[in-house]
Image: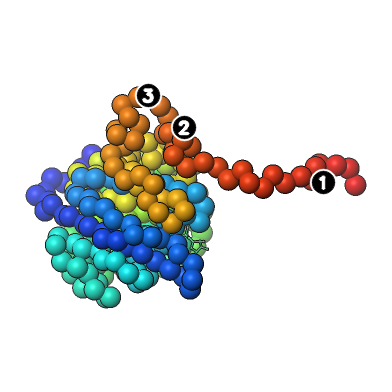
Amino acid sequence: MTFFGVYHCQQMELELRNLTKLFGAKSVLREVSLTAHTGYCVGVLGRNGAGKSTLFNLLTNVLLPSSGEIILDGQALGETFPVATKRRMGALVNQAYLVEQLTAEEYLQYVARIYELPEAQARIESLLAHLLEEYESVRCKRLSSFSTGMKQKVAIASCLLHRPELLILDEPFNGLDVFSADSVLSLLNSYRPQALTFVSSHNLAHIERVATHLLVIDDSEVKYWGSMEDFLQGQRAFLGEALLQLIHPNTSTTQDLTWLTTQR
Ligand SMILES: Nc1ncnc2c1ncn2[C@@H]1O[C@H](COP(=O)(O)OP(=O)(O)OP(=O)(O)O)[C@@H](O)[C@H]1O
């Protein structure tokens, strides 16, 4: 695959040092620490409300930590990340915002202008052709007429266009059918050596296909940080089984739901 060509990539090191986030009195992330490098694809796992999106919002400077530091290549990033640092990042967090009056190509040309990419057209064409199998038939259509999954794929393309060194994707497979998820997974796998990637998903099969490392968050804390291989302990265990051994489902409240199925 040749979306990005072969180019010499710098090694990036990202360190999270005791990263903590409180919302009021509620602690959402407590003392998250890790060091990751270019070439890692970190799958971020945890139950609903575990703090995954909060972590991604901290990594992209959307939120400020209550305490702790984000250190990039040895430099602590302060309250406002330098523009040069932001240029090294590509992020899909929260709801992707697209300019819906534009076509997919026009939107990516607009993104290319923001990043001052002089020769982005070939990349735009190859990304769209790879991600949108129906691309020829929707080439002239505005994004407002795209389906949820099609918009998601354009948003993913927009994160990759400037070849970020730090790629942060919060639930990128949301809304994607099995074929689309497969094209995104193959894209991420081909891009992986050139970046440090963080990706969250509740689809463990997707994480298993793409992640080299895992960060499992539960009860505001890191329950596991390390390689996928170590997590699975060299066994042929499925990720889902191994995850359930680490974080147990909440079983404290068993509700009587017979009212749902009893006749009126
Ligand atoms: N702006 C906010 N103000 C107050 N509480 C918040 C805010 N954002 C998130 N939270 C709370 O922080 C906790 C973690 O939320 P977060 O969105 O990070 O979880 P998540 O792991 O991404 O969940 P999901 O898997 O459902 O997407 C939740 O309890 C949520 O209610």
**Foreground: 19 or 135?**
19
The residue shown at (50%, 56%) is 49
Report crowding for label 2: few under 14, some 14 to 19, many 20 or more residues within 10 A (C-alpha): few
Circles 1, 2 touching at the beta carbon (< 8 Å): no
- Between the C-alphas of marks 1 and 2, the distance is 32 Å
Residue 95 pos. (x, y %): 46, 62
Identify whether 76 is placed above or below 167: below
**Foreground: 196 or 68?**
68
Circles 1, 3 touching at the beta carbon (< 8 Å): no
The local secondary structure at tag 2 comes to helix
Residue furthest to the bottom = 80
Residue furthest to the top = 236
Earlier-in-chain disc, 1 versus 3: 3
The residue shown at (26%, 66%) is 69
- Between the C-alphas of marks 1 and 3, the distance is 41 Å
Identify whether 157 is placed above or below 130: below
The residue shown at (22%, 57%) is 15
Q: Amino acid at mark 1?
A: Trp
Q: Amino acid at mark 2?
A: Glu
The local secondary structure at tag 3 comes to loop
Q: Amino acid at mark 3?
A: Arg
The residue pinned by badge 3 equals 236
Q: Is residue 79 visible?
A: yes
The residue shown at (80%, 42%) is 258
Q: Is mark 2 within 8 Å of ligand 1?
A: no
- Between the C-alphas of marks 3 and 2, the distance is 10 Å
The residue pinned by badge 1 equals 259
Earlier-in-chain disc, 3 versus 2: 3
The local secondary structure at tag 1 comes to helix
**Foreground: 227 or 176?**
227
Q: Which mark is residue 241?
A: 2
Residue 82 pos. (x, y %): 21, 73
